[in-house]
Image (cartoon, rainbow, N blue to C red):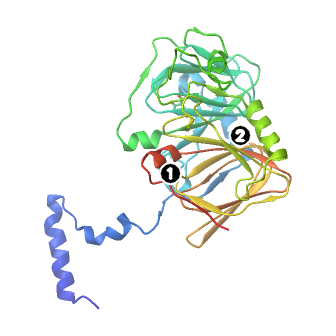
């Protein structure tokens, strides 16, 4: 039934009159506020390493790590330009550190993950312990811990930074401060946290040095890859994920960080996966091999062919399908722990 013009005019007058009082009618926006299903403004996007790397290297000439504090090119969702966000809740960037450089020590509430993309020999220091980076390693900077990065090796090192910056900004809960020294004093031998917590054992009298965050700073690629390879040989292959494992906080069995979940998966050669969608938008870093992802939502479709060191994002409630002719290894992260903590996580696997 059509609403008479006089009624519509009366409503418009009502809205205009209440507007100076900072009042607005719910019924005009209700449908968008409480949509029948998630309708993210984010779009799928793909950054080939071939396209990104030259800009990273030019950034290496344009500014030092010291002056930049963090020399990072932000991977911005094309639909969220200017917001430093790859999804509504997550930040991603590629950080470059050249031989001899130091990115000075600071700390912030935002949790960070590093996934090493290219080069070896750089380190990140957390709480007085350094961890040397190798491609494929997954490294954690817990919330509010001092961290500095440096490169004492001979090659450029690039890693993916994943942070919960947009989430912390949304909550207006961000604090940060610089350290009194540029580089942290090393107080513990490299590998000490891994020795304590990395072998399915834990110190009897030391629990949770970083609260809700994993006590392991570095999850080495060699170990993750070995597990995936053995599972590819021995275990049934999941029709959606291939062989996929999630990283864990060994003290809780939960995700390594309170705000971000991390995963590594191997698609066997010849894999053609089934489609799925989930409420947690996910960012992918291609470790080895080649493959493709087909994404669909609201009648729109995307197809990305990816290779090593490429990055792509699958936004919330977009249906995705992975495939690989020759096999590949993918790292990914999402805000799943937050969805789970709020008991609103949903996943749908299409048959
Ligand atoms: O390494 O501390 O990409 O504070 C963005 C903000 C990296 C870092 C980023 C940061 C860092």
Q: Which residue is mark 1?
A: 81
Please give the count of numbered marks on the rendered protein.
2
Q: Quadrant of residue 144?
A: top left
Residue 206 position in % (x across, y down): 52, 16
Q: Quadrant of residue 19?
A: bottom left
Under circle 1, the secondary element is: loop
Give above or below for 29 relative to 107: below
Query: Where residue 62 sits: x, y (%)?
Result: 62, 30
Task: Rate crowding at label 1 as few (under 14), some (14 to 19) or many (20 or more) other CA atoms within 10 Å.
Answer: few
Q: Residue at x 21, y 82 (%)?
A: 8
> Which structural element holds mark 2?
helix
Relative depth, front residue between 239 and 129 = 239
* N-term-proximal mark, 2 vs 1: 2
The crowding category of the residue bearing disc 2, from other C-alpha atoms within 10 Å (few below 14, some 14 to 19, many at least 20), is: some
Q: Quadrant of the N terminus?
A: bottom left
Residue 53's disc is 2
User: In the image, residue 242 lies at what x, y percent?
Assistant: 75, 52
Residue in the picture at 68% in, 68% down: 351
Q: Disc 2 versus disc 1: distance between alpha carbons?
A: 20 Å
User: Which sits in the foreground, 332 or 23?
Assistant: 332
Percent position (x, y) of residue 99? Answer: 71, 20
Q: Residue at x 66, y 36 (%)?
A: 56
Q: Is residue 242 left or right of residue 202?
A: right
Answer left or right for 93 relative to 145: right
State left or right for residue 175 relative to residue 309.
left
Q: Which mark is residue 50?
A: none
User: Is 70 above or below relative to 170?
Assistant: above
Q: Quadrant of residue 6?
A: bottom left
């Amino acid at each position: 039934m059509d609403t008479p013009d006089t009624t519509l005019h009366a409503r418009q007058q009502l809205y205009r009159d209440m507007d100076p009082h900072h009042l607005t009618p719910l019924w005009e926006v209700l449908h968008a506020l409480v949509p029948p299903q998630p309708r993210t403004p984010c779009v799928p996007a793909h950054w080939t390493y071939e396209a990104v790397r030259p800009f990273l290297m030019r950034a290496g000439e344009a500014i030092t790590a010291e002056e930049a504090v963090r020399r990072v090119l932000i991977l911005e969702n094309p639909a969220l330009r200017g917001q430093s966000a790859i999804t509504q809740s997550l930040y991603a960037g590629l950080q470059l550190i050249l031989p001899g450089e130091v990115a000075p020590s600071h700390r912030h509430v935002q949790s960070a993950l590093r996934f090493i993309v290219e080069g070896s020999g750089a380190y990140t220091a957390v709480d007085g312990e350094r961890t040397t980076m190798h491609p494929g390693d997954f490294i954690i900077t817990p919330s509010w811990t001092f961290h500095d990065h440096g490169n004492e090796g001979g090659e450029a090192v690039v890693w993916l930074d994943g942070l919960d910056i947009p989430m912390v900004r949304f909550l207006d809960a961000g604090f940060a401060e610089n350290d009194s020294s540029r580089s942290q004093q090393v107080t513990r031998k490299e590998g000490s946290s891994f020795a304590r917590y990395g072998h399915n054992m834990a110190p009897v009298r030391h629990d949770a040095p970083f609260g809700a965050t994993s006590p392991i700073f570095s999850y080495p690629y060699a170990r993750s890859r070995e597990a995936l390879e053995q599972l590819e040989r021995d275990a049934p292959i999941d029709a959606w994920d291939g062989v996929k494992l999630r990283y864990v906080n060994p003290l809780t069995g939960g995700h390594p960080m309170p705000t971000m979940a991390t995963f590594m998966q191997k698609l066997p050669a010849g894999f053609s996966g089934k489609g799925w969608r989930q409420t947690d938008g996910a960012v992918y870093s291609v470790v080895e091999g080649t493959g493709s992802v087909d994404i669909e939502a609201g009648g729109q479709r995307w197809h990305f062919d990816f290779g090593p060191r490429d990055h792509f994002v699958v936004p919330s409630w977009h249906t995705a399908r992975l495939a690989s002719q020759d096999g590949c290894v993918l790292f990914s992260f999402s805000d799943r722990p937050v969805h789970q903590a709020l008991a609103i996580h949903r996943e749908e696997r299409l048959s």
